[in-house]
Image: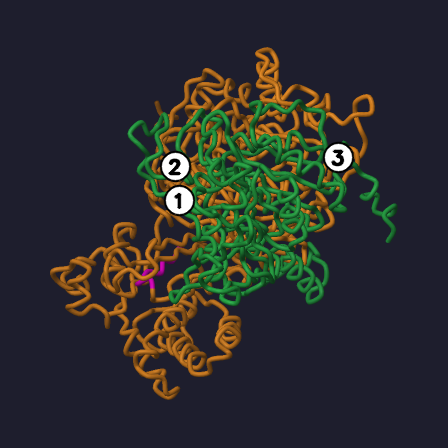
Chain colours: A green, B orange
Amino acid sequence: MSPDDTGAATLSRKDFQSDQEVRWCPGCGDYSVLTAVQLLMPDLGVKPEDTVFVSGIGCSSRFPYYMNTYGIHSIHGRAPAIATGVALARPDLSVWVITGDGDGLSIGGNHLIHSLRRNVNLTILLFNNQIYGLTKGQYSPTSEVGKVTKSSPFGSLDYPFNPISVALGAEATFVARTHDMDRKHMQETFRRAHEHRGSAFVEIYQNCNVFNDGAFEQILAKEKRPEMLIELRHGEPIRFGPDGSHGVVLNEFGEAEVVDVADVGEDALLVHDDSRPDPSLAFALSRLADQPTTPTPVGVFRAVHRPVYEDLAQQQLASAQERSGPGDLRTLIESGSVWEVG
Amino acid sequence: MAKTIEQREQVVIRFAGDSGDGMQLVGDRITDVSAVFGNDLATLPNFPAEIRAPAGTIAGVSSFQVHFADFDILTPGDVPNLLVAMNPAALKANLGDVPPGASIIANVDSFEDRNLEKAGYAANPLEDGTLEPYRVYPVPMTSLTLEATKEVGAKPRDAERSKNFFALGLISWMYTRPVDPTVDWIEERFGSKAMVRDANLAAFKAGYHFGETAELFDHPFEIQPAQLAPGKYRNITGNLALAFGLIAASQQSKLPIVYASYPITPASDILHELSKHKNFGVRTAQAEDEIGAIGMAVGAAFAGQLGVTATSGPGLDLKAETLGLAVSLELPLVLVDVQRGGPSTGLPTKTEQSDLLLAVYGRHGEAPLPVIAASSPSGCFDAAFEAVRIAVKYRTPVILLSDGYLANSAEPWRLPDADGFPDISIPFATEPNHDGEFWPYLRDPETLARPWAIPGTPGLMHRIGGLEKADGTGNVDYEPANHDFMVRIRAAKIAGIANDIPPVEVDDPDDASVLVLGWGSTWGQIKAALRHLRESGKAVAHAHVMHLNPFPANLGEVLGRYEQVLIPEMNLGQLARLVRAEFLVGVVSMTQVKGIPFKASEIQAKILEMIDS
């Protein structure tokens, strides 16, 4: 098929931009995610009319309004369930979920984990800014313990979720992390997530410059990145640092540890394999950093194949029709014991 | 020796035993053979929420009442003519409903000390005169079953479980029920387990022959077939009829069903039934929770299919927020609420009509939506079809109210002509509708419904959400005047449906001054009460509303024609409250929340009191 037949190759960023004024705070990390997605969409080979963005509530959930696709800005936490309905009804569509740390991991945690385990064909972008922004600054389920906010003047007591660990625990088949300071990395990650058949979960470290400014500064400041970001690349030894001087090994308990390559030798380094059916390796990597203050892995943790929910549902429909023929109302109504009164 | 047969017009039998005794199965069998025999019938299953409450206790008693007759009947009967009590607890739990002079068959084997004690009997009621007012037939069902199944070779513990088939055999003889359908059924149902099949067959036949040969019973009874309207019939429960109605509506609206629900009594059977019919293109999903279920239905609606979810009271509470979203999105959606006793977990297996106000009003903001109620088991088919018609035509969520009684009760259903269902499909939007643009909230001037443009349609991409939208464009808009307009136009859309539903019919042949206004499952009991009153020369009128929001356009005028209006309902007066508020009329509210339907005699007495006042 030539590019002209799909029409997709001739599209540009403009085709995916809606006419609505973008209304995030100036300097918000959401802008760079939106730009990354709008620029990427024309390359994905999907038409705007075949694309649906579903979001919940929160700053990031305004995202669908700015995409010239089909979209639902729904209610708090429910986007994965609503998107599951879209995908179940229409496996032909490209369905994206836009959510945040509060929306996806607090009020909507249940829908998120269940869509992941079902492996619905959704691309889920979770904007993690470790704060409730739209309600003006309360601690979120990813905020660090002791965080002082309007709702926690003496420090928050709640132990935070690690979103990557949660997704892996929920049997997600694709799990990745990226951040709002690197468009290329975001686009590479989003592209792989989109190409993955099944639920693809992407955590995006996103700065809220009004209520939680600098939350990721210790790892994302330009000068810090070489030292603090551990880029996961499938099939390659896990190394980082300005000159590749650091690396990751598995210790005797199967836990991932940061080491100096000089101490252990290159051969001892862990070679990343995102295709392992068992999620243990990915989980160990997800535990390398509790909070974005120590060297933190980014990239694809896990990408494995498992049957897709709506494909299986479709197969059941097809085999039922093969077995019983297309449904016939008369046959249905007259099933069971029928008698006639003359 | 052949005994003479006494003709009866009708009988009400109640089978009662432990939850594990198979009473529902026996009831179902008698129901099926009576239907095929040609009687009219109605049933009332009644079982505990616990799967197996401790054996022998009152809490564990399960019962099944069946009423069959040679005329068209309206209810499962107020009181049984015959109670079959498999143990002392079953007797104790049900005796209060048995009128003096009625018959009781008791499994005398189970009336021993331990069971008597569990039921709270200090002495054996079969011997201490408690049952003097009744005709009591003590039958050693357990030992006769064991004796009969000896040849089959089943262990006594297994063989004893066939005693419900002994009871079934005995009742089949007593009421001259055809034997062959039950024999065939046992052979088919238990065909893969030869020993169970043979034990059940042996017990069934032993029960039948016991009736014939024992000197206990004078003679059997016969209830002739009823003169029902010509046509094809089958037995149907409310939940089954509801599932069929949804499928029919899906076919006639040309919208495949996406049915998402979370298991909840008494609605789960709808999910079970629909999941069998995937050849109709029905997709079923068991969601992670009630909210997820309605979320999936909303998503399916946005994608251009028929999103349906079902639940009971606790689930309706949970779905409220998403219903509000559907009101705002203006997408078609059907939510079935099979009501049960509340509040909270309440009475999971018992019936009630106490979700009416929740259905009509239970959302934040001004969030009106149509509410429809089914009034008989087979009527659930028509109600489901109507709910889909309105949802699709007006792009609105619709709540369809059923209840635990309708859900599980069975009655003969005269089958509709499968070719006669109306086409209820509507066209999707395919073209821009405003100067080359697509405006998702540009309304049809007649119905006020907005266009339904589905993903995959080029040029009609649009975003909708729970934030207030500008009239026409659908863009987010917080302007005061726009919000005021949008709230009012959403309300006007729903109110306008009153012009698209049939006027309420009044059954009033005698120019009465008292009107009984009903809704939902009280239909049969009200009609039965009216029948008795009219037979004794009393004039009384009846109107039954299927559409509870909006009401039929003529309801106010109808109410104004009567000096007195009685509203019986299984809540504390919810329709009465709605009617008073809407029409400023005085009504008499008659209420009951016992988890069981009204007795027709209770409604009858109340009407008489009003007529005589």
Q: Amino acid at mark 2?
A: Met
Q: Quadrant of the C terminus of chain A?
A: bottom right
Instruction: Name the secondary structure under disc 2.
Output: loop
The part of the chain drawn in magenta is B12-19
Residue pointed to by mark 1: B351
The crowd level at tag 3 (other Cα within 10 Å; few <14, some 14-19, many 20+) is: some
- Report whether residue B566 is seen: yes
* Amino acid bearing label 1: Thr
Q: Position of residue B518 (x, y in %)?
A: 47, 33
User: Is residue B499 positioned above or below B378 on the image?
Assistant: above
Decide: is B466 above or below B156. above
The chain under label 1 reads: B
Q: Which residue is mark 3?
A: A13
Amino acid carrying mark 3 in the image: Arg
Residue A57, x across and y down, in percent: 52, 32
* Residue denoted by label 2: B570
State the separation of the CA atoms marked 2 and 3: 60 Å
